[in-house]
Image (spheres, rainbow, N blue to C red):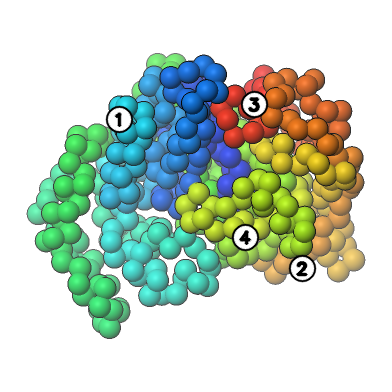
Amino acid sequence: MPGIAVLGAQWGDEGKGKIVHLLSKNADMAVRFNGGTNAGHTVVFNPDQADQAGESEFRFHLIPSGALHPNCVGVLGNGMVIEPFALAAELRQLSEQLGQAPRIWISQNAHMILPYHPIVERLEGATSELDTTAKGIGPAYRDKTARHGIRTCELRSPGRFQELLAQNLARERAIFPDSQELQELDPAKLTEQILAATDGMRDRLTDTSLLINRALDEGRAVVFEGAQGCLLDIDFGTYPYVTSSSATIGGVGVGAGVSPRRLERVIGVAKAYATRVGAGPFPTEETEALGRRLREQGHEYGTTTGRPRRCGWLDLVALRYAVRLNGLTELALTKLDVLSGLDQLQVTVAYRREGERLTEFPTTLEELSACEPSYQSLPGWSERLESCRSFSDLPPSAQRYVRFIEEQLELPVGTISVGPSFHDTIRIAGG
């Protein structure tokens, strides 16, 4: 399994962390290639046991979830934006939980989120309009594009780092002259604090593109872990209600410095239903009792912000779009267990807009906002699924549900998650 990409096939929060963790058990390297602290991946397992006794919950925002395995090196790629204080805190937390620090490498070309970025985001009002995580992600990526961002390699030269920091602060203060928060930031003090936080990390800065490509040349197994999801991609998502980076297969190339041609498998991760956090169109959203039930049964609250997620039925129109954009080779279906207890399940097979039936995902906000789902009903099941370990263990209606998804997408389901634990997993179709 030399090169595998794991991508969100919906609006994020699909359970990619667990799938990456499963795949990375026998991998040599796990690579994050986009996003920053706006990502939230959760893994439940016991690093010392083969069974479920004494399992703990591990939460990730920057470090690849595959880095929990002692044999797997975590890589933070150049396409990420890295908040140094958050990375230091995450390393400390994981070190305490694991009893040792995860092994990581950090791209020397990755840009940083610095203390003024969240302030600027709040001052611009983008957090309220687009309902972002308010972590400064957008301003950091904007600085990168405007060519006055600050990369991690600058940490090696404290004088140069402080100079760039002072220039950027002066620019932001000129734009927001009444901001007391910006006025209170001192470049010299910030430099001292950031260098202290990153002490011990600076020797992990390297050309990660070279590192990853050499690993692939040697036949080593590399798993690429995407953040957010296809429908939040800056180019192909529901713009402007999107993230600021490439969450599709193209992100592997620009965010890790690796040709997508080196990937043997591209796994799309999707929930057995659909969720979305924040504003933006969501054709299958259920705002009444069913939506509340899915939220509570599925514990649909953001790992990063704690915000409640909007919930609704599975959308195969959107998933077909994800298959096409990413060239998915298989699907990992998560949270199938959450649907237990429902007599009837609805699956969106098409949209209706002004009397027209659509089977392709609209690419403009106006078109998608005017769409209504066209459902196909399938029988539900009452049995709990947490103890299922093979496809044949699933109730017949659950098996039919999975097979229906495969038929509609013309794509195999290789992995099914039936609970939060590492062990609550069914592997099928070569997954």
Residue type at mark 2: give it.
Answer: Ala
Q: Residue at x 12, y 48 (%)?
A: 157
Residue carrying label 2: 370
The answer to whether the residues at label 3 and label 2 have Cβ atoms under 8 Å apart is: no
Q: Is 48 left, or right, of 191 in this rendering?
A: right
- Give the x, y percent position of residue 294: 71, 50
The answer to whether the residues at label 2 and label 1 have Cβ atoms under 8 Å apart is: no
What is the count of numbered marks?
4
Residue carrying label 1: 101
Distance from the alpha carbon under mark 2 to that under mark 1: 50 Å
Reply above or below: 196 against 27: below
Q: Is 57 left, or right, of 338 in this rendering?
A: left
Residue carrying label 3: 425
Q: Nearer the viewer, mark 4 or mark 1?
A: 1
Point out the tag, 2 or 4, that comes first from the N-terminus.
4
Q: Mark 1: which secondary structure?
A: loop
Q: Residue at x 55, y 23 (%)?
A: 52
- Give the x, y percent position of residue 295: 67, 52
Distance from the alpha carbon under mark 3 to that under mark 2: 37 Å
